[in-house]
Amino acid sequence: MRAFWKGCGIEVTSDQAREVDLGEAGLIWSDEVRGVEGNFFGLIDARNRAVQFYFEASIPNDVEDASHLRIILMDFPQPERNGSYGKLVTVGEVYGLIAMAFRIGADHRAFGELTFTAW
């Protein structure tokens, strides 16, 4: 898989995405993306499909365990349809969803009920 992300002061665009394994992906998600509104982590699979995990809100400073916060938009861009499939997920779900993308690819049909939103 190839990864792209925006973290605190770091941005790797999708056209500069770099090859990563699951371990590296997890470290980027936990150490570089951080819980700040607007930051994101994305993966591009071998079939050029993408999934992105976007912080819709920041993790509040007074929260020790943010795993229950449903503030991450899981998004599967569909440029050919001028929109994307997505849903809000919790911070704690993201690593498992990243691992799932590594197993099966970024196929939106395998990630449960999603809503299509036009751009």
Image (spheres, rainbow, N blue to C red):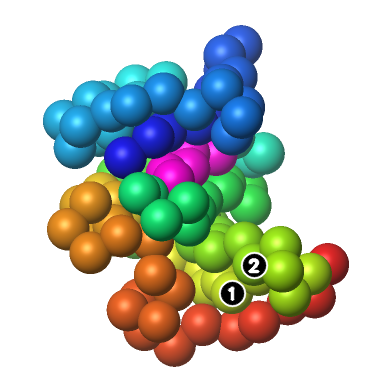
Query: Is disc 2 surrounded by few (<14), some (14 to 19) or many (20+) residues within 10 Å?
Result: some
- Let me know if residue 35 appears in the view: no
* Range drawn in magenta: 40-44
Residue 88 horizontal/vertical position (percent): 52, 69
- Judged by its main secondary structure, the magenta piece is strand
Q: Is residue 42 magenta?
A: yes
Amino acid under disc 1: Tyr
Question: Closer to the N terminus: mark 2 or mark 1?
Answer: 2
Name, please, the residue furthest toward the front.
47
Mark 2 and 1 residues: CB-CB less than 8 Å, in contact? yes
The residue closer to the viewer here, 65 or 6, is 6
Q: Quadrant of residue 23?
A: top left
Residue at x 35%, y 76% (from the top left corner):
111
Q: Which residue is pictured at 42% across the width and 33% down the height?
A: 3
Q: Which residue is mark 1?
A: 85
Q: Residue at x 48, y 51 (%)?
A: 48
105 to the left or right of 79: left
Who's the residue at 56% across and 22% down the image?
A: 16
Q: Is 107 a magenta residue?
A: no
Above or below: residue 81 compared with residue 16? below
Q: Secondary structure at mark 2?
A: strand
